[in-house]
Structures are given as structure tokens and as C-alpha cells.
Amino acid sequence: MNVLTIIAVAVCVLAPGAFCESSTVAWCYHNSSCSDSTWPTIAPLHCNGTRQSPINIASANATENKNLTEFTFEGYDNKSALATIENTGETVKVNFSAGIKISGGALSESYDSLQAHLHWGNGTAEPGSEHTVDGKRFPMELHIVHSKSTYNRNATLAVKDSEGLAALGFFIEELTGVDDQPASWKTLTSYLSNISNAGGNKTIHDNISLDDLLSGVNRANYYRYLGSLTTPTCNEAVVWTVFKEPIKVSKNLIDLFSTSLHIKNSTSLMVNVYRSTQPSQPVSTQPKASSSTKSGYSLALMTFALIMARY
Ligand SMILES: *[C@@H]1O[C@H](CO)[C@@H](O)[C@H](O)[C@H]1NC(C)=O
Ligand SMILES: *[C@@H]1O[C@H](CO)[C@@H](O)[C@H](O)[C@H]1NC(C)=O
Ligand SMILES: *[C@@H]1O[C@H](CO)[C@@H](O)[C@H](O)[C@H]1NC(C)=O
Ligand SMILES: *[C@@H]1O[C@H](CO)[C@@H](O)[C@H](O)[C@H]1NC(C)=O
Ligand SMILES: *[C@@H]1O[C@H](CO)[C@@H](O)[C@H](O)[C@H]1NC(C)=O
Ligand SMILES: *[C@@H]1O[C@H](CO)[C@@H](O)[C@H](O)[C@H]1NC(C)=O
Ligand SMILES: *[C@@H]1O[C@H](CO)[C@@H](O)[C@H](O)[C@H]1NC(C)=O
Ligand SMILES: *[C@@H]1O[C@H](CO)[C@@H](O)[C@H](O)[C@H]1NC(C)=O
Ligand SMILES: *[C@@H]1O[C@H](CO)[C@@H](O)[C@H](O)[C@H]1NC(C)=O
Ligand SMILES: *[C@@H]1O[C@H](CO)[C@@H](O)[C@H](O)[C@H]1NC(C)=O
Ligand SMILES: *[C@@H]1O[C@H](CO)[C@@H](O)[C@H](O)[C@H]1NC(C)=O
Ligand SMILES: *[C@@H]1O[C@H](CO)[C@@H](O)[C@H](O)[C@H]1NC(C)=O
Ligand SMILES: [Zn+2]
């Protein structure tokens, strides 16, 4: 097979198509001539940097930071916000319409939500999340990509700021015991057979929101670190938020990603689309129930016991 038939020519830096810059880097996941071990050589400017993503998160090493408050999600409930779904040749990407944003979560300002895409392995049998936690790799990982509102979606400016982008990572794990669940993921994956070839895209019907795709996930608990884009050109411009609780999706729907999509100019299926973990970075997280809460709780219990004792 000619290398040109399998490499992906990325004119764009982030889940290709979303962030374009002048340089062109031919990268791929699977041919040894352009797979991730070559990225530090073929895209040395950033891919050979010192705060590269993804990483393994050692949960016991995460420092406690009480500043890591909850996010405010604006437009995540909008059932018209997911505009298109596209096979980029390296992933499946969903573009959002304007007006979706996040703030809070210890971010310095609000960030516009631009797109979401996924990373996966080979069905539920071979997991393919990018981040790992204590060495555990999950079946899939959803990335929701945002850029600092000040930059008004200008990627050139955003990638020059060490915190210009904010990525939310959600693990996806198998929901056992049921097929075709949840409904939002059944709807989303129903498009995959229609974008089986690279470059294919579809307009999304007006009935799934980001909240629907994230349903059941506690978004107050997450890991935070500063890292990079996980595809060339690997710019070190990303504030990463990796949520602890996974989204649960049934096996039959997870399997559709590794069986429905083809890579660029090829009959090969799109499998194992994730970068290897990079050297670890300082990670922080919310404090465990603080001592003041604990003593408040026991005080409340004591008060309750005293009140009860009077009756
Ligand atoms: C990988 O690319 C090389 C050219 O650099 C090509 O000769 C080889 O056949 C490709 N391998 C596969 C598995 O496609
Ligand atoms: C790959 O496909 C694109 C269109 O999808 C085409 O423009 C390009 O020439 C093809 N490249 C090769 C090497 O076949
Ligand atoms: C998604 O957005 C990117 C960046 O704005 C654009 O290049 C791409 O063409 C869009 N995809 C579709 C299918 O509209
Ligand atoms: C990457 O950086 C390391 C350490 O700075 C250096 O030893 C290595 O030669 C660099 N590799 C490339 C391809 O630039
Ligand atoms: C936790 O951090 C310490 C000190 O940086 C390091 O030696 C250790 O390997 C880390 N633990 C894990 C599981 O990564
Ligand atoms: C929390 O925020 C305060 C005020 O911005 C800052 O001074 C402090 O260093 C932050 N703490 C941590 C652990 O980042
Ligand atoms: C939901 O998104 C659509 C498409 O961008 C927009 O037209 C509509 O005003 C939004 N609805 C709300 C309530 O913001
Ligand atoms: C993916 O799994 C299928 C069977 O489930 C197997 O036939 C195929 O070889 C696997 N592909 C890779 C790249 O491991
Ligand atoms: C982004 O900002 C740069 C620098 O200010 C400017 O040259 C470029 O034209 C802008 N791009 C877009 C798409 O507005
Ligand atoms: C969205 O609409 C499609 C058909 O219009 C339907 O099959 C699907 O169940 C709906 N999904 C949700 C999450 O309501
Ligand atoms: C996918 O394509 C088939 C026909 O090729 C069509 O019946 C179906 O409605 C399409 N589904 C979506 C979600 O566009
Ligand atoms: C989306 O697909 C249509 C064909 O269905 C194609 O004409 C169009 O160029 C594609 N758009 C993008 C942005 O790839
Ligand atoms: Zn990603």
C-alpha cells in the first residue's frame, strides 16, 4: 500500500479541520513512517515539547486544589447545537453552532465550545482512550474542544497562548446488560454508516444536546493539568479537564466506531485512534470532603443526637 493512501495530510492542528495553520504535517496513527512515535521528528516544533498530552493520571499523586469549582455550561442543553458530523479520516468530529460556551472550573475566562471528537480502540475488546488513570485505559474518550472567548475562535491566536484552548475529556465505558443505550448515543452513532468514508459529513437532526450525550456524569469531579493537543502539531496550549466519572454506552454502540468508519483513501477500518501516553505532568483535583465539612457533619450529628435525647 502506498503511504499516501494511508497517511493523513493534516493542514490543521487539532482534530483536523478545526484548527488550520499554514504548515502541513503528514501524520497518521498506524504506518510506522508517520505514526505517533515519529511525531517528535516530523513535527518537532511542539510534538517534542515537555508538556505533551495525553498522560497517565496517577490518582494518588493528584494535589488537592479547592479552586477547582464546578463549570457553568451554556447551551449544553440546546438540542440544535450539534450541527454536523464528519469523518475527518482520523476521527469522527461534531461541529457545534455558535453560542455554546463554558466558564468557571478555575478557567481564567469563558471559552467558546467549537467541536467534539472521539478516540477509540477496537471495540470494547481493545480500549482506546487517550488518557489513562492509574494505568487503566477506557474503551473510548470524548473530547470537547473550546477556545478562549477573547480570541473569537481565531485558532492562530489561541494556540499561541499556553491556556488558549480548554479541552474536556470524558471517558466512555461499557454499559452492561442493555443494548442500544443511551438514546442520545444511539442517535449519534446512527450517522456513522452514512459517513463511512473520509470526508463524509451529515447535518445532525435537531434532537440531541451535549447534556444528553453526557447524561449521568457527575461533572463536579475532575482532574486538571496543563498539556497539549494530542495530534500534530501538538501545540502546548491546552488546559485539560479529565472527568473522573465515565459516560456509559452499550457495547453494540461502542463497537460501531471501529466497524463503520474507514481511514483516508483506504479500505482499512479506523481503529486504535489514540496517541501513546507522554511523560507525566502535575495534576490537581478537588479536595476530598474537607475537614471543616467533616466536623460540621459530626457537629450536626451530635446536635441531632442531643435533640433526640431530649425526647
Ligand atoms: C507505510 O508507508 C511506507 C512508505 O513510507 C510503505 O512502504 C508501507 O507499505 C506502508 N505500510 C503500510 C502497512 O501501509
Ligand atoms: C485521496 O483522496 C482524495 C480525495 O478524497 C484525493 O484528492 C487524493 O488524490 C487521494 N490521494 C491518493 C494518494 O489517492
Ligand atoms: C467544521 O468546522 C471546521 C472549522 O470551522 C470546518 O473547517 C469544517 O469544514 C466543518 N465541517 C463541516 C462538516 O461543516
Ligand atoms: C527532542 O528533544 C530531545 C530532548 O530535548 C532531544 O534529545 C531530541 O534530539 C529531540 N528530537 C528531535 C527529533 O528533535
Ligand atoms: C507520584 O509522584 C512521585 C514523585 O513525583 C513519583 O516518584 C511516583 O512515581 C508517582 N507515582 C505514580 C504512580 O506515578
Ligand atoms: C487559588 O486561587 C487563589 C486566588 O486566585 C490563588 O491565590 C491560589 O494560589 C490558588 N490556589 C491554588 C492551589 O492554585
Ligand atoms: C440553540 O441553537 C440554535 C442553533 O445555533 C440557535 O438558533 C438557538 O437560538 C439556540 N437556542 C437557544 C435557546 O439558545
Ligand atoms: C479488531 O478486532 C477485529 C475482531 O473483533 C479483528 O478482526 C481485527 O483484526 C482487529 N483489528 C486490529 C487492528 O486489531
Ligand atoms: C487571526 O489573528 C491573526 C493575528 O491577529 C490574523 O492575522 C488572522 O487574520 C486572524 N484569522 C482569522 C481567521 O481571523
Ligand atoms: C432523535 O430523532 C430520531 C429520528 O428523528 C429518533 O430516532 C431518535 O430516537 C431521537 N433521539 C433522541 C435522543 O431523542
Ligand atoms: C443514512 O443513509 C440511509 C440511506 O443511505 C438513510 O436511509 C438514512 O436516513 C441515513 N441516516 C442518517 C442518520 O442520515
Ligand atoms: C459535506 O458533504 C457534502 C456532500 O454530502 C460535500 O459536498 C461537502 O463539501 C462536505 N462538506 C465539508 C465541509 O466537508
Ligand atoms: Zn482528541
Image (tube, rainbow, N blue to C red):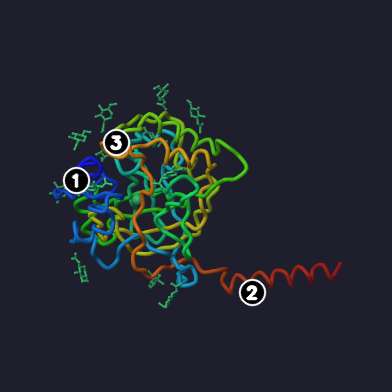
Foreground disc of the pair 3, 1? 3
Which numbered tag is attached to residue 11?
Answer: 1
Which numbered tag is attached to residue 295?
Answer: 2
Q: Which residue is mark 3?
A: 198
Query: In the picture provided, is 228 more to the left or to the right than 210?
Result: left
Residue 39 placed where, x, y %?
A: 24, 57
- Residue at 43 percent of width and 68 percent of height: 284
Specify which label sits upstream in the sequence, 3 or 2: 3
Specify which label sits upstream in the sequence, 3 or 1: 1
- Which secondary structure lies at badge 3? loop
- Residue at 34 percent of width and 30 percent of height: 202
Quadrant for the N terminus, please.
top left
Q: Nearer the viewer, residue 65 or 21?
A: 21
Tell me where residue 228 sits by quadrant: bottom left
- Residue at 43 percent of width and 58 percent of height: 242
- Cβ–Cβ under 8 Å for marks 3 and 1: no
Identify which amino acid the numbered label 1 is placed on: Val
Foreground disc of the pair 3, 2? 3
The residue furthest left is 22
- Which secondary structure lies at badge 2? helix
- Residue at 46 percent of width and 66 percent of height: 285
Tell me where residue 205 sits by quadrant: top left
Residue 118 placed where, x, y %?
A: 39, 46
Identify which amino acid the numbered label 2 is placed on: Ser
Specify which label sits upstream in the sequence, 1 or 2: 1
Identify which amino acid the numbered label 3 is placed on: Ala
Q: Mark 3 vs ligand 2: CB under 8 Å?
A: yes
- Which secondary structure lies at badge 1? strand
